[in-house]
Image: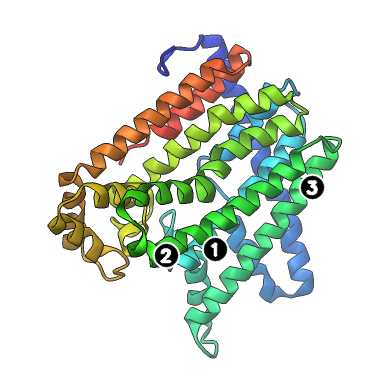
Amino acid sequence: MSHDSIASPADTATVQAETQAFLAGLTRTLDTWFQQQSAGAADISEAAVPLVESISALSTGGKRLRAQLLYWGWRAAGKAADSTVPLEAAAALELFQTAALIHDDVIDRSATRRGMPSTHERFSSLHTERRWEQDPAHFGSSAAILTGDLALTWSEQLFNLAVEHAGHPSGAAEDFATMRTEVMIGQYLDIHAEVAGPDVPRDQAVQRALDVLRYKSAKYSAEHPVALGMLLAGGDPDLVRAGRAFALPLGEAFQVRDDVLGVFGDPATTGKPAGDDLREGKRTVVIGLHFERADRADAEVVANSLGQQDLSEVQVRAAQEALRRSGALTATEDLVERLTADTFEALDQLPVGPVVRTAFRTIAQAAVRRDR
């Protein structure tokens, strides 16, 4: 079955209606949570309110890919559309992602996120505007770390509520803990690769990049959300395994595409400057494939660009051209196509009804077919 298969109009309409209702409910759940937390922070000190505001700003909007995958994982196991469980669990995932983004921006020293100032830049600017004492940048980074930690705390609280309201189903809490552990280890592997990358043999560079991609991003972007929805619903172990088989290559395809956008993406689409991953020294799959394939001159062009914070647009374009000449960009696009094929092949084997299959197919198509 082609991943361009056309669903019936009735199934598509059902998916759209359910998804819209779920996302509206998720927005209400998060808004209510932020209102409660803002009031609680204000009771402690008015100075603490910007912590809540920063988390709320970064948790608003976006594609909510993880939330949708969790919801349809819940529905795949036959549970009701109007339950509060997937809303609470999805809100937990959104807050976990917010925490990861905040910490990631501190680590990468990224000035922007989704076209807006990153959290540490928001706090640094607040320091400057108020003419406070000491170093604005240090205050910004410190406040962002604590803001990310607060989002992590709330994420756990909300997921615990979901587990409680679902009747403490087997495996759900454990999978949520595994997801968090994997992301933290994957994040460390990412920063380790930035500094230890030159020591990695060429024939291991791509696998090292794939390990970072899988554990830092791909599993928590797709595999765990689908599995968590199914586990919270008390899904059969065979269903959960099939859900993971579909979602893992989807998460990997999504992230490999994201890494391509990190070098070749349009800032108007990505919300980050062109070539931002080069400036951050990211040893992604496309970079690993380049070092495997490039001649010495083109290898040096890209190597010299990695980690250079002041990289100019001219230097970014030179690195992009080198990546094209080596065939790394084409090879990376081919990898995305293979992972995409694996995704839809596994989806065809997933033991679910036509509505859930249509939902998963729609999400997958949107995830893997983003424009530069």
The structure residue drawn at horizontal position 65% and vertical position 64%, both measured from the top left corner, is 149
Q: Quadrant of residue 152?
A: bottom right
Where residue 229 appears, as percent x and y from the top left, is: 69, 33
Give the amino acid type for the residue marked by disc 2 in the picture: Ser
Q: Quadrant of residue 42?
A: bottom right
| C-alpha gap between disc 3 and disc 2 | 32 Å
- Foreground pick, 88 / 104: 104
State left or right for residue 4 relative to residue 50.
left
Question: Which type of secondary structure does the marked residue at label 2 adopt?
Answer: loop
Q: Is residue 110 visible?
A: yes
State left or right for residue 127 relative to residue 236.
left
Give the amino acid type for the residue marked by disc 3 in the picture: Asn
Is 318 above or below relative to 126? above
| Mark 3, residue position | 160
| C-alpha gap between disc 1 and disc 2 | 10 Å
The structure residue drawn at horizontal position 37% and vertical position 36%, both measured from the top left corner, is 370
Decide: marks 3, 2 in contact (CB < 8 A)?
no
| Mark 2, residue position | 110
Is 150 above or below relative to 228? below
Where residue 353 appears, as percent x and y from the top left, is: 63, 13
- Foreground pick, 337 / 357: 337
Query: Mark 3 vs mark 2: which is more N-terminal?
Result: 2
- Numbered tag placed on residue 312 in the rendering: none
